[in-house]
Amino acid sequence: MKKQWIVTGAAAILLVSTSAGVYAGTQLQQIKAYLDPSMKFKVDGKPFQPQNDKGAALAPISYNGSTYLPVRAISNALGVAVEYDGKTNTVLLGEKIAGIPIADSFGGDQRTKDPDLTSYNGKDYKDVFFNNLSGNRSSSFMLYPKGKYQKLYLQVAAIGEDIERFFVQDDRDDSKLEIDTIEVSEGLKTFEINISGVDELFVYADVKDGGSMFVPLTTSYYK
């Protein structure tokens, strides 16, 4: 079953368009509305065409003096994350109230729960990414937010030696969302990164010989 989300700029009313077979028992009301393909849009002064997930153009809907636009297309244009919670029939826009630990979907090769490796400055983080390969000057892993979140709060520490170059990259277009260095003396450093609309992230560090990158997966989270 495929859902399309439509929102009005006038009253923030949400409608669901789905198959007729699921109408029974819901609170959906049938209306008579009009598609208006002649209406044009600009975002920050640049022309914008709402599209569905297959790239086909979408026309706004006119109903009772209000214009209704597809939520996902508009959220992508404005940099606002959007997700649908089917259990509560709720469209979620922007940051989540509660953070979602990246551990819930992390699949990196150097993930460990070894107590000898998960502790940092006296605290056991239980589940971490820890690259301690001797002589390896690079360390990296992938994250898959799948466009569901507005922000990534990523904690990183350099152990043994400084991290000379650290970046988080949108794997869709290779744009760098964060570039920095991390010194051992800085301790556990937290990066707040806007990831609205991002499906995949590439996290990379250049580590000096003998150093490691430590990322606690339980206290790094999406919102």
Image: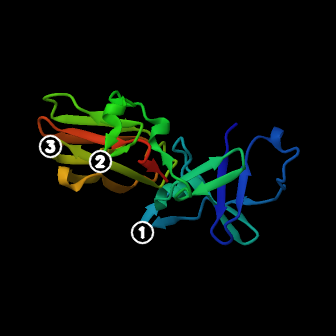
Count of numbered tags:
3
Label 1 – label 2 distance at C-alpha:
46 Å
Judge from the rendering whether residue 176 lies leftward or rightward of residue 55; answer left or right: left
Question: Residue 146: x percent and y percent?
Answer: 48, 42
- Whether 39 is drawn above or below 128: the answer is below
**Direction from residue 220 to residue 17 in the image, left or right:** right
* Residue furthest front in the image: 122
Q: Which label sits on residue 161?
A: 3
Could you say whether the residue bearing mark 2 is in a helix, strand or loop?
loop
Callout 3 secondary element: loop
Is residue 171 at all visible to an observer of this figure?
no
Residue at x 37%, y 55% (from the top left corner): 193
- On the picture, is 156 further left or further right than 99? left
N-terminal label among 1 and 2: 1
* Position of 124 relative to 64 (above/below): above
Q: Amino acid at mark 2?
A: Asn
* In this rendering, the label closer to the viewer, 3 or 2: 2
Q: Nearer the viewer, mark 1 or mark 2?
A: 2
Residue 53 sits in quarter? top right
